[in-house]
Image: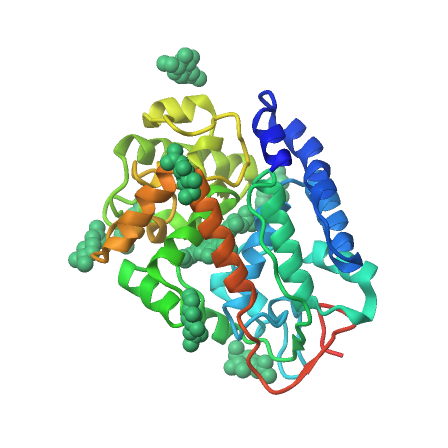
Amino acid sequence: MKLTRALAGAAVLSLCLLLAVQPEAVAAAAAGGKVESTVRTEVVKAIRADPSVGPALIRLVFHDCWVNGCDGSVLLDTTPFNSSAGVEKAAANNIGLRGFDVIDAIKAKLGDSVSCADIVVLAGRDAAAILSRGRITYAVETGRKDGVVSSAAAADATLPESTFHIDQLTDNFARKNFTAEELVALAGAHAVGVSHLSSFRDRINATTRTPIDPRYQAALAGDVEALKGRQNSTDPIEKFNIRDMDAGFRNASGFDAAGVDMAAVGVLDNSFYHANLQNMVLLRSDWELRNGTDPSLSDSLFAFRDNATVWEMEFAAAMAKLSELPAEGTRFEIRKSCRATN
Ligand code: HEM
Ligand SMILES: *[C@@H]1O[C@H](CO)[C@@H](O)[C@H](O)[C@H]1NC(C)=O
Ligand SMILES: *[C@@H]1O[C@H](CO)[C@@H](O)[C@H](O)[C@H]1NC(C)=O
Ligand SMILES: *[C@@H]1O[C@H](CO)[C@@H](O)[C@H](O)[C@H]1NC(C)=O
Ligand SMILES: *[C@@H]1O[C@H](CO)[C@@H](O)[C@H](O)[C@H]1NC(C)=O
Ligand SMILES: *[C@@H]1O[C@H](CO)[C@@H](O)[C@H](O)[C@H]1NC(C)=O
Ligand SMILES: *[C@@H]1O[C@H](CO)[C@@H](O)[C@H](O)[C@H]1NC(C)=O
Ligand SMILES: *[C@@H]1O[C@H](CO)[C@@H](O)[C@H](O)[C@H]1NC(C)=O
C-alpha cells in the first residue's frame, strides 16, 4: 500500500524514466521464495532492456493456459511428433507472440527443478505488477508440470480471434468457465502492447468495420500507412492504446482523456475502458464487448472505466484463475529446455 501511494504521488514520468525506475521499486516490495525472486529479477531486467516485452509476457499466460491448460506447450519449437510448422507457435492466432527469450533466460537461472509452465505464469504475473506500477498483484501456486503435446490446430481451435462477435467471445470464455465479467476484465490487458495491422484491418475498412469513431478511424488508417514505411512491412505493428499515441493523433481523433492519466504511458491501467466506450479500440473483439445483450458486459465496461481499483482487483483475480487452468494430457515432465521435450 505504501508503495502504491508513493508511486501514485510520483511526478510525471516519461516512459523511459518510468520503466527504468519502477521495475526495481516494484521488485523490492515483492516477498516470496528463491524461485519467485529469481523470476522477478529476470523480468525486471528484461523489461528494463526492452519495455515492450512486458505486454508480451502477460499475453503468453493467456496463450499457454487457454490451450490444454498451463503446461508450457506454447513454448515448444518442435515436438517428437510435430515439426515447427505444427506446434502452437505456428498457429495463426499466435501471431506476434514473443517473450520466449526471457523465459529461456529465467529457465537458465532456475535449472531442472522448475517447470517452464510455472515460469510462464510467474513471469506474466510479475510483468503485470511492473506494468501496473505495483497495483496489480496476485498469488499463484507453483508445481505445474510441462506437457509434451503442442498443436497449431488446437491453438487455432481454442484461442479467440480478433474478428469474433460477442457471442463467440462469451462462448469461448464460458468453455473455460470464465464469466462475461471476467472476459471484460481480461480484455483490459489490451491497454498495453501492440497488434499487427492484419489483426485489425477490418476496423479501417469501410465495408467491414464495426462501430469505430470516424476521426479515430481516419487517424489510424493514416498512421498505419506511415508505419508501413517506417517498419518496412506490409503488416506493421500498431500500439493498442490511444493514450500512448502522439498528441497529433489524439487530437485528430478527438479523444476525450477525462479520467485517463495521460502521463502513464505504457502503464497497465483501466484506460482501455475509456477508449472502448469512445469506440477507439483496435480490435473488433474489443469493440464487440459493447455489443452484447448480457447486461453484465456493459455494466462491467462502465464499472471498470469509472473505478480503476475495481478493475485492478477483477483483473488480478481473473489472471490468477487463468494461471490455475489445469494442464490436460497424460504425459508430463519438467523440461530441460523450454523449447523442446526431454
Ligand atoms: C478476448 C479475446 C482476445 C482476443 C480476440 C485477443 C486478440 C489479440 C490480438 C489479435 C493481439 C495482437 C496480435 C498481433 O497481431 O500481433 C493481441 C495482443 C495482446 N493480447 Fe490479446 N486477445 C484476447 C484476450 C486477451 C487476454 C485475456 C489477455 C490477457 C492475458 C490478452 C493480452 C494481450 C496482450 C498483452 C497483447 C499485446 C502483446 C504484445 O504487445 O506483444 N489478450 N490480442
Ligand atoms: C501435431 O500437429 C497436428 C496439427 O497441428 C496436431 O493435430 C497434432 O495433435 C500434433 N501432435 C502432437 C503430438 O503434438
Ligand atoms: C467455475 O468457476 C467458479 C468461480 O469462477 C468456480 O467456483 C467453479 O468451481 C468453477 N467450475 C468448474 C467446473 O471449473
Ligand atoms: C474491404 O473489405 C472488403 C470485403 O472483405 C474487400 O473486398 C475490400 O478489398 C477491402 N478493402 C480494402 C481497401 O482492403
Ligand atoms: C451486434 O450484435 C448483433 C447480434 O446481437 C448483430 O446482429 C449486430 O450485427 C452486431 N453489430 C455489429 C456492428 O456487428
Ligand atoms: C524491406 O523489406 C524487404 C522485404 O522484406 C527487403 O527486401 C528490403 O531489403 C527491406 N528494405 C530495407 C530498407 O530494410
Ligand atoms: C493538441 O490539442 C491541444 C489542445 O487543443 C493543443 O494544445 C496541442 O498543441 C495540440 N497538439 C498537437 C500536436 O496538435
Ligand atoms: C472504487 O472501488 C473501491 C473498491 O470497491 C472502493 O473502495 C472505492 O470507494 C471506489 N471508489 C470510488 C471513487 O467510488
Query: x and y percent of residue 209 in the render?
Result: 27, 47
Q: Is residue 213 left or right of residue 127?
A: left
Q: Give ligand 2's quarter of the image.
A: bottom right
Screen quadrant of the N terminus: top right
Q: At 40% from the left edge and 65% from the top edge, which residue is drawn? A: 178
Q: Is residue 214 left or right of residue 95?
A: left
Compared with residue 185, is residue 265 higher up or lower down, i.e. above or below? above
Q: At 37% from the left edge and 53% from the top edge, which residue is drawn? A: 184
Compared with residue 223, is residue 126 higher up or lower down, i.e. above or below? below
Could you say which is closer to the camera, residue 66 or residue 248? 66
Query: x and y percent of residue 25 in the render?
Result: 70, 36
Residue 52 in sight here: no
Residue 75: name its quadrant: bottom right
Query: x and y percent of residue 187 in the render?
Result: 42, 51
Compared with residue 284, is residue 81 higher up or lower down, i.e. above or below? below
Could you say which is closer to the camera, residue 235 or residue 282? 282
Q: At 39% from the left edge and 61% from the top edge, which residue is drawn? A: 161
Could you say which is closer to the camera, residue 226 or residue 256? 256
